């Protein structure tokens, strides 16, 4: 199975494919003035293989040129000690963040998403008499991936997700009613192996940063990274689709 999944991942730029790269993040842990506590986001970037190929190649060239293993948006903004981005100059980190924002604007791309709070999930658990027992993060991921399989109504779609911690990839993440997904489900793999996952990570980071920093941004007190995150979110207009309401892509 892994050999087949490796082949799919190595050939993401093959013509006439629809590619979906997905990531997740906590939007909040504690409540804010505008957001409830324990709010989780799942988001994807969906793009044609013909558009993705050149973008991935350019970003890969940037990483190679600067001796960096991968883009990890939060690390680019706030690199911790011992991380590869720690010794990268501010200007270059901002350049990298801007490049990821440009990648999010890939021609014809869509940005489907779902979100769920622990509070709402606990309410569902109570209403169903305990039939739903999974953690809210797992519940959200299950519904998101199932919805993505329905959304990707194309002849040759590929759904790629970041691996769970300490799980080597690629491995197949089964999805009930996987439709036409190549490989038979979501392909879970380490993010450093697939540029598309790093772009999806930027989408999740941009949404989180904008929601938490928007008051400072509107007041003109946002950092350069806050401003770029706001630009990224603004670029989602017309492409940001709540999956439960979204129409499947045209086959």
Image: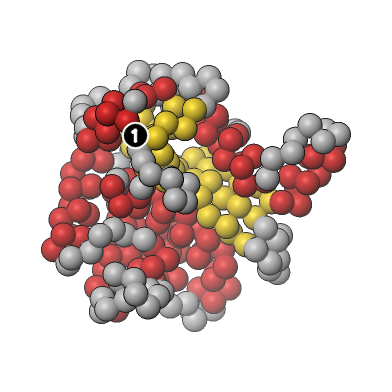
Q: Can residue 246 be seen in this view?
A: no
Image-based side of 222 in relation to 9, left or right: right
The quadrant in which the C terminus is found is: top left
Disc 1 secondary structure class: strand
The one nearer the camera, 132 or 65, is 132
Residue at the image position 27 percent from the left and 29 percent from the top: 3
- Residue 175: x and y in percent read 52, 27
Residue sitting nearer the eye, 9 or 16: 9
Q: In this view, does 173 lie above or below 98?
A: above
In percent of width and height, residue 131 lies at 79, 32
Q: Please report the residue visible at 34 percent of the width from the left and 58 percent of the height from the top.
A: 101
Colour mapping: secondary structure
Q: Quadrant of the N terminus?
A: top left
Residue at the disc numbered 1 = 19
Total label count?
A: 1
Q: Can residue 142 be seen in this view?
A: yes
Tell me where residue 211 appears, x and y as whole percent.
56, 63
Dot 1 crowding, Cα within 10 Å, few <14, some 14–19, many 20+: many
The residue that appears at 47% across and 47% down in the rendered structure is: 164
Question: Which quadrant of the figure has residue 30?
Answer: bottom right
Task: Determine the residue positioned at 65% across, 55% down.
Answer: 39
In the rendered structure, the answer to whether residue 6 lies left or right of residue 29 reads left
Percent of width and height locating residue 166: 44, 50
């Amino acid at each position: 199975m892994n050999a087949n999944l490796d082949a799919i991942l190595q050939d993401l730029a093959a013509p006439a494919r629809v590619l979906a790269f997905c990531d997740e993040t906590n939007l909040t842990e504690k409540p804010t003035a505008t957001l409830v506590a324990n709010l989780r986001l799942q988001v994807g970037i969906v793009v044609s293989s013909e558009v993705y190929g050149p973008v991935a190649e350019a970003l890969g060239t940037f990483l190679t040129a600067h001796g960096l293993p991968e883009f990890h948006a939060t690390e680019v903004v706030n690199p911790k000690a011992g991380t590869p981005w720690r010794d990268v100059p501010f200007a270059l980190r901002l350049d990298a963040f801007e490049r990821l924002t440009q990648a999010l604007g890939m021609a014809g791309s869509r940005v489907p998403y779902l979100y769920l709070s622990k509070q709402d999930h606990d309410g569902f658990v109570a209403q169903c008499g305990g039939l739903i027992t999974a953690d809210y993060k797992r519940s959200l991921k299950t519904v998101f991936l199932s919805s993505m399989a329905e959304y990707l109504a194309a002849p040759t779609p590929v759904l790629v997700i970041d691996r769970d911690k300490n799980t080597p990839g690629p491995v197949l993440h089964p999805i009930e009613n996987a439709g036409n997904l190549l490989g038979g489900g979501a392909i879970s793999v380490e993010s450093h192996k697939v540029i598309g996952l790093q772009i999806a990570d930027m989408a999740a980071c941009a949404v989180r940063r904008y929601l938490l920093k928007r008051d400072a941004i509107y007041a003109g007190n946002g950092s350069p990274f806050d401003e770029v995150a706001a630009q990224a979110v603004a670029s989602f207009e017309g492409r940001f689709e709540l999956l439960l309401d979204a129409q499947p892509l045209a086959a």
